Each structure stands twice: as structure tokens, then as C-alpha cells.
Image: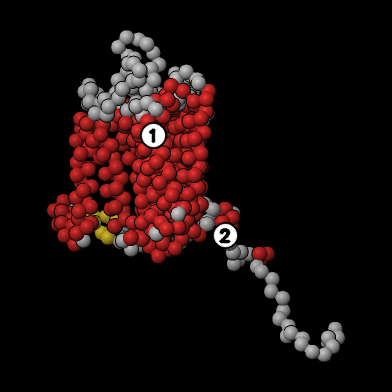
Amino acid sequence: MAPSVTVGERTVTLSPRLAWRVAREEFSSQPRPLKIWFGFLTVLLAIGAVGAVFSLNPGDEVFGTRPSFEWGILITAYVFFAITTSGLCLASSLGTVFGIDRFRPLEKRHALLALLSLITAFGVILLDLHYPLRLVFGAVLSPSPLSPMWWMGVLYGGYLFLLMIEVWSMFRGHERIHNVSCLLASFMAILAPSTLGAVFGVLASRPFWHGSFTPPSLLMAALLAGIALLGIVFACVVKFRLAGWERAESLAIPGLRVLLTIALFTALLVVGWQVLTSLYGAVPGLSDAMWAMVLGPLALTFWIGKVLLGLVIPLLLVVVPRFYAVRGLFLASVLTFAGVFLDRVLFVNAGQIVSSTTSAGVATFPYNEYIPSPVEIAVVIGAFGFLAFAYTLCERYLDMSEHTGDHLPILSRWGRHEPHPDDEAHRPYHPPHKAPHTHGPAPAEQ
């Protein structure tokens, strides 16, 4: 008898022939729009697979990077997916850790999205290294505690382990393990992107990255990306009446709209402060990079892609009452999600667009140039396709009903609006009922 595994409520056989038959029957039973969606994602995965094959050979120069522009769009994609993981956990910690009922519907979907986003980030960075085992050899066999990049690998590796524990304990019903893993993952959601920001912030030769401003700005981008991705997913949950859509519509959607409004407004302030301080200080390299972003070759991406489409229009969509429908949040989330990716593209490119050396053959005037190669673009397309494909499978075959387990005893009290039913000290006091006295003298006290 062929072995089998249980996925959600379904038993899947491991026999190739029977598995193919089950897969074919399952595909034929799917609605037509879902078939088209899976077909589209399969094309994206095929494109990514071709790019991955070409990128693995260390001797092939298949990337568009050069000595003056060493970090390309694959680094951008890695940073984007890594911070999205942290943003998902930060947004959902309001429900998983603090027990605010409005954000309880985010729990299962946030955990799966965070896990898949981090797996995608690791896949992208492994392909960027050409030789994936370098990451294992460097982090394990040759530790470097003084290097922020080593700490980034350690923290994100631990973060991946915690997310796996969180997902496993949530679906298997181990509430105590789930509560502890949620709390630790929430702390890691702050530490990991801060360390990732330090990888850029300690580079004194790149003034646009250098400084203490980079880690918190990366954390802000993480929160924005996580909220936007949750907005996209839960708008689809309500649209297609998926598991838990009623509470998602009444609780999660309004909560995400509030979070997205706060995050977008804060991001606009951060962008304005960054532009003003960079230009006013006239620091060599820093002001040049900002001028390249404001009026130079990066200006179109900055003003149209990041500011207008990624911040201003989404903010209008979530604050104007006319767009309070679910589709308004969906459009705002899509634009914000794309805007955060463009923001990371600008961040990585602006740090390298100004020449840091005048060696012949390295520096170009007035700005360094970088054009992503077809292989790099294919890998990024495949990364987005993998994230969407894997999550769609989870949404279809796993139990995505709302998690009803208890939260941490202390932190959950902070987010509740009603007293705990088992706590005698917090039960409301109701005085004994007395009939109203309408006429005659007041009765004498016994």
C-alpha cells in the first residue's frame, strides 16, 4: 500500500500514479477563474525556474551588476520579502499577542504569509550568491559576531524557525507553544529588520545608507508592506467569500484600514524628513544621491512610483469615506505594496548611484548605471509567483477558519474592552434593585 500524508482534512497519497490521478481530478473540479489563476502563476514559476537555472553557475556573468554597482535587484527583492515578513508579524501582533479582537482574524493568514515571504527571501538571496552553500558555510562554519550581516543571517534563521513553530502549533492546537512562539516572533520582527538595516547603515563609503536613520526607516517600510499584503489578502477573502469572511469584513477590514492610514501618513512624514535633511546638510555623496532621486535619473520612480502611486493615492483611498468599500482598501493595498517595492529599489540604487571611487574603469559620470539583466528579472518574477502560488494552495487546502485559542494571559488583557469573565475582582458591581419612591414620606430605615 502506498504511503500517504494528511493535508488539512484531506489525505494525499504519495504514489506517483495515484497522486497524478488525484491532482488531475482536483484540477478538473476547480472553478474556471481559479484554473486561470493557477495557470498564470505556473507561467510565473516557469519564468523564475529558467532564471534560477541560469543564475546558479558561479562563472556565468548573467547579472547586470558591476564593480561600481554591486547590489542589484535581487538584493532589493530579498530586502523586500524579508521586511514584509516582519511587517506581517508586527501588524498581526495586535491580535496574536495583545489580544485585540479586531485583529484576531489576521492570525492564521498572517503566519502563513510571513513564513512563505521569508522562505521566498531566502530563495532569492541564495540565487544571488550563485553558490547557495556559501550562506551555510559562512554563517555556521565561519561565524563573525562583529559583522551585522552575520547577525542578519542568524536572526532571520531563528525567525524562520519561530515562524515554523508558530504555524505548526496553530494548526495542531498546541496553544501554550503557540503563545510563546507568537511572542518571540513579535520581538524578532523588530530585531531582524533592524539588523538588516544595520547591514546598510554601517557602510561609511555609501553616505545614502550610512547612519542610524536606516534601521528605523526599514522598520517603517516593513510595517507598510505587511499591512498592505494583509489588505490585499483579506479583500480577496471577503470578495470570494472564503473561510471567515464575515468577521474579516466586520473586523479585519476596518482595522487594516486604520493601520494603513497611520502607516501611510507616518511614511509620508519620514520621506519628507529624509529629503529635507539630506539636501540641507549638503553631505558629499548623501546630497548627491538625494538630488539624483529628486531631480536626477531616479526622479520619475521617486515622484510617480513611490510618492504619488505608493503613498498619496493610497492615503486618499483609505481616508475618503467614498472609498470605504472593500475594493477601495484592495486598490490602496495593491498600490502601497508596489510602492514599497519601488521604495526598496530606490533605496538600493540611490546608495550606489554616486561614485565612491575615481578609479579608471569603475566610476561613470555623472552617475553609475545599472540595468537588471533578464535573468535577474526572471528570478524576481518567479519569487512573486512562488509566494502567490504557495499561499493560494494554503488558502485552498488548509483550514483557514479563525484561530480561537487563548492568548497570553497578561498581554491579552490589554486589548480587551470587557473584563475577564473569570476574574472576580473585575466583575462590575450591580447594586440591589429598589422600587422608586413616588409619594409620601420616605420610609424609615430599619
Q: Residue at x 52, y 56 (%)?
A: 99
Q: Is 152 displayed left or right of 359 in the figure?
A: right
Q: Quadrant of the N terminus?
A: bottom left
Residues at marks 1 and 2, CA–CA distance in whole angstroms: 41 Å
Task: Tell me, yes or no, if residue 301 can be seen here.
Answer: yes
Q: Is 1 displayed left or right of 284 in the figure?
A: left
Q: Secondary structure at mark 1?
A: helix
Task: Pick out the residue farthest to the bottom.
Answer: 440
In this picture, is 274 found above or below 66? below
Query: What's the amino acid at mark 1?
Result: Phe
Query: What's the amino acid at mark 2?
Result: Arg
Q: Residue at x 20, y 30 (%)?
A: 54
Task: Tell me, yes or no, if residue 340 can be seen here.
Answer: no
Mark 2 or mark 1, which is nearer the start of the sequence? Answer: 1
Q: Secondary structure at mark 2?
A: loop
Splitting the image into 4 quarters, where does residue 423 fall? bottom right
The residue nearer to you, when weighing 335 against 158, is 335
Please provide percent x and percent y for residue 172.
Answer: 39, 56
In this picture, is 223 found above or below 69? below
Disc 1 packing (10 Å; few <14; some 14–19; many ≥20):
many
Please provide percent x and percent y for residue 86.
Answer: 44, 42
The mark lying in front, picked from 1 and 2, is 1
Task: Pick out the residue farthest to the top.
Answer: 360
Disc 2 packing (10 Å; few <14; some 14–19; many ≥20):
some
Please provide percent x and percent y for residue 441.
Answer: 84, 88
Identify the residue under disc 2.
416
Identify the residue under disc 1.
302
Q: Quadrant of the C terminus?
A: bottom right
Q: Residue at x 35, y 58 (%)?
A: 237
